[in-house]
Image (tube, rainbow, N blue to C red):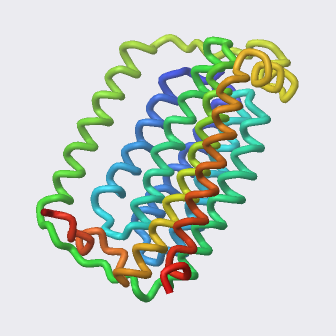
Amino acid sequence: MIPLNVSLLLSAALFAIGVIGFVIRRNAIMIFMCVELMLNAANILFIAFAQAYGQIGGQIFVFFTITVAAAEVAIGLALIVAIYRSRHTLDVDGLNELHG
Amino acid sequence: MDILLAFYIITGVIMLLAAIAMVNTRNMVYSALYMVVVFLATAVLYLIYQAPLIAMIQITVYAGGIMVLFVFVIMLIGTDKMIHEEHIRWHRPLAFILTFALVAETAYLAVYRFGQPTLTLVNQDFGSPNEIGLALFQKYVLPVEVTSVLLLVAMVGTIVLAFRKEKMK
């Protein structure tokens, strides 16, 4: 069957791509999608370890993670639309009016 | 080696290539479509890991619901407004260095801590809707209830954020 270290490497690579995208892209929606990518990488490991140890708890955790991610996306996109309505930009470097 | 491992690696490579394309593409609609490919590949990995219910939830909630929401917002705002400007010079090389360190650490751990292949077919019922449903509503019934409150909060918050403009007029 599949060695656990293969899934660890795959998940780490996916997480790394998410981190790189998070840092180098300046668009709020792209940053948000990269966060989803990182969540996905963590979910893969939960499923892999759940099967490796024969525990159903890992799959239950992914179930709840997906629920939280859905709620997070709904709130986050509403925030992004609200920011765009008032600022007319989604460049996160332009959203710096909060510094004292 | 065996066919399941080959299948797994092919799916993983497709997923990583789609993720790289997603981060690299300038057009955000294409990015969202590559994201759908990543989610579908992840669902295939879940199927290999004996998690059929989670795989189906992944497809319906992520590839269905969440990505439609993303595409909808991208269409609403319009991709022509997304001008990409580089403001900080040093953050791109720093990102690559730090991420390489992260991957190297994980690779070290993966090779030296989890060297033995432990994945085996546990039992045929593992991860079936029956078993997950029983676990959800017996052992994990409190988190399910808390999740319902979370979803209510998310719904109310989204409606408040979306209608704020109209209320002010």
Residue at 45%, 14% in the rendered image: B115
State the residue in front, A51 or A95. Answer: A95
Q: Is residue B111 above or below residue A83?
A: above
Residue B3: image location, x then y, percent: 71, 31
Q: Quadrant of residue B140?
A: top right
Kindly tell me whether residue B160 is visible in this rendering. yes
Question: How many labels were placed on the picture?
Answer: 0
Residue at the far front in the pictured view: B168
Residue at 73%, 30% in the rendered image: B51
Residue at 21%, 65% in the rendered image: A98
Question: Left or right: where does residue B9 sit relative to residue B130?
Answer: left
Q: Quadrant of residue A1?
A: top right
Q: Is residue B157 above or below residue A94?
A: above
Residue B90: image location, x then y, percent: 12, 60
Kindly tell me whether residue B6 is visible in this rendering. no
Residue at the far right in the pictured view: B130
Question: Left or right: where does residue B134 sit relative to residue A47?
Answer: right
Residue A92: image location, x then y, percent: 29, 68
